[in-house]
Image (tube, coloured by chain):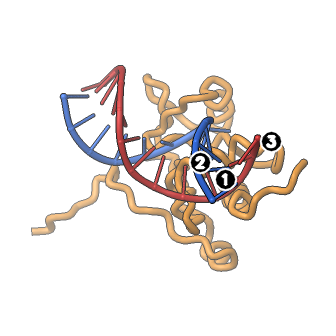
Chain colours: A orange, B blue, C red
DNA sequence: CAGATGACTCCCA
DNA sequence: CTGGGAGCCATCT
């Protein structure tokens, strides 16, 4: 296999930290990797993954809302085998399976940023 | 060096 | 809720 571009290598490294049964989005991975990486770049890295890193759990990366667009069937099957639940429209239940990011030591060692906050959570703002 | 591409996202009708 | 269009960015020709 050819040599993976530097940014891709970081993306693969981070993706390998996602434990089974959990998922994250392209945008989240991009935000944690940083260095001018965006959601599309992550998608491109995963597309080329077969040539660079066959051991990356690509199925754990889904769209922002949990939907799977391109290789849906295969991906959904793999995730269900890990215990990830889907709603009737075929979207992974991000609220329950979202990955919180790598542990602090790992993040610090590789300079990964924190995962972005999510407005999907029933936060209690407007305290009074 | 410039143009094309893609496993994404956000915004508006 | 669904669909179409623009924005973004690293890589590849």
Task: For mark 2, name the chain.
Answer: A
Mark 3 vs mark 2: which is more N-terminal? 2
Q: Which residue is mark 2?
A: A22
Specify the label residue A19 is tagged with. Answer: 1
Which comes sooner in the sequence, label 1 or label 3?
Answer: 1
Q: Chain of mark 3?
A: A
SS assignment at label 1: loop
Of tags 1 and 3, the one toward the viewer is: 3
- Closer to the camera, C6 or A53? C6
Left or right side of A55 for A74? left
Labels 1, 3: one chain: yes
Q: Residue at x 62, y 70 (%)?
A: A103
Q: Residue at x 48, y 38 (%)?
A: A66
Tags 1 and 3 touching, CB below 8 Å: no
Question: As displayed, is residue B11 above or below residue A124?
Answer: above
Q: Residue A88 sits in which quadrant?
A: top left
Q: Around disc 1, counting alpha carbons within 10 Å, would you say few (fewer than 14), some (14 to 19), or many (20 or more)?
A: some
SS category of the residue bearing label 2: loop
Evaluate if marks 1 and 2 touch, with contact meaning CB atoms under 8 Å apart. yes
Q: Quadrant of residue B11?
A: top left
Mark carried by residue A105? none
Residue drawn at (60%, 71%), measured in percent from left and top?
A112
Drawn side of residue A88 relative to residue A62, left or right: left
Q: Residue at x 53, y 50 (%)?
A: A39
The label number, if any, that marks residue A50 in the structure image: 3
x and y percentages locating residue A2 in the rendered image: 88, 51
Q: Secondary structure at mark 3?
A: helix
Is any part of residue A121 visible from this angle?
yes
Q: CA distance from mark 1 to mark 2?
A: 6 Å
Query: In x, y percent, where is residue B5?
Result: 62, 35
């Amino acid at each position: 296999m050819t040599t993976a571009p530097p940014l891709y290598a970081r993306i693969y490294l981070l993706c390998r930290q996602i434990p089974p049964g959990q998922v994250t989005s392209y945008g989240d991975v991009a935000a944690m990797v940083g260095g001018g990486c965006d959601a599309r770049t992550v998608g491109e890295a995963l597309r080329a993954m077969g040539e660079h890193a066959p051991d990356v759990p690509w199925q754990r990366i889904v769209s922002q809302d949990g939907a799977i667009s391109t290789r849906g069937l295969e991906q959904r099957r793999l995730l269900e085998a890990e215990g990830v639940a889907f709603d009737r429209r075929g979207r992974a239940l991000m609220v329950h399976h979202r990955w919180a990011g790598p542990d602090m030591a790992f993040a610090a060692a590789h300079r990964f940023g924190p995962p972005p906050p999510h407005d999907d959570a029933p936060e209690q703002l407007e305290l009074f």
